Image: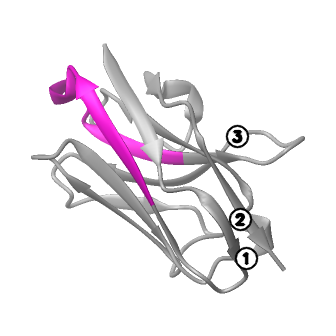
Amino acid sequence: QVQLVESGGGLVQTGESLRLSCAASGRTFSSNVMGWFRQAPGKEREFVAAIHRSSSSTRYADSVKGRFTISRDNFKNTVYLQMNSLKPEDTAVYYCAADSRWAISMSPSVYDYWGQGTQVTVSS
C-alpha cells in the first residue's frame, strides 16, 4: 500500500503561482510513476503531469505546458507541482497518484493509489 497526502492548494488570483506537494508513505519503492490529475465540478478527472522515478522523463497536458513543472525528491518521497501563470480554468481539485508501471500514462484508470485531493481556486 502507498499513502499519498497532498498539500499546498489555496485561493490565488490570475497570474499568480502555487506549489503543490504530495508526500508518499508506505511501499513507495513500487511507485515508478507519480502523477498529478485535476477535476473541476461537473467534469471528468484529467491528466495534468507525471514524472518517472528517475526524474529523467516527464509528461504534461498541453493545457499546462510551459506553466507547470513537476519534480520529485525520492529521498523525501515527495512530488511537487509548481504552477505558474495560473488561470481561472486551472480551478479544480488536484490529486496526486502513484503507478507501479514503468511507462508514464495519462489515463487515471491505470494509477494504483490516490491522495484525497487539494483545492486550487484561481479568481479572475
Magenta region, residue range:
20-36
* Residue 58, image x, y percentages: 35, 60
Any mark on residue 104, and which?
Answer: none
**Residue nearest the observer in this picture, 59 or 16:** 16
Q: Amino acid at mark 3?
A: Arg
The image shows a total of numbered marks equal to: 3
Q: Residues within 10 Å of mark 3 (few under 14, many from 20)?
A: some
Residue under the image location 39 percent in, 31 percent down: 4
State which tag comes first along the sequence, 2 or 3. Answer: 3
- Is the Cβ of the residue at disc 1 closer than 8 Å to that at disc 3? no
- Could you say which quadrant of the image residue 42 lies in? top right
**Left or right, 16 with reference to 71:** right
**Left or right, 110 with reference to 91:** left
**Residue nearest the observer in this picture, 9 or 70:** 9
Q: Amino acid at mark 1?
A: Lys
* Residue 26, image x, y percentages: 23, 20
Residue under the image location 43 percent in, 59 percent down: 59
**Residue nearest the observer in this picture, 112 or 103:** 112
Quadrant of the rendering where the C terminus is positioned: bottom right
Q: Which residue is mark 1?
A: 87
**Left or right, 69 with reference to 57:** right
- Could you say which quadrant of the image residue 35 lies in? top left
Q: Residue furthest top?
A: 1
User: Residue 29 colored magenta?
Assistant: yes
Q: Nearer the observer, disc 2 or disc 3?
A: 2
Mostly what secondary structure, the magenta segment? strand
Q: Residue furthest right?
A: 42
Q: Which residue is mark 3?
A: 45
Quadrant of the rendering where the N terminus is positioned: top left
Q: Which residue is mark 2?
A: 90
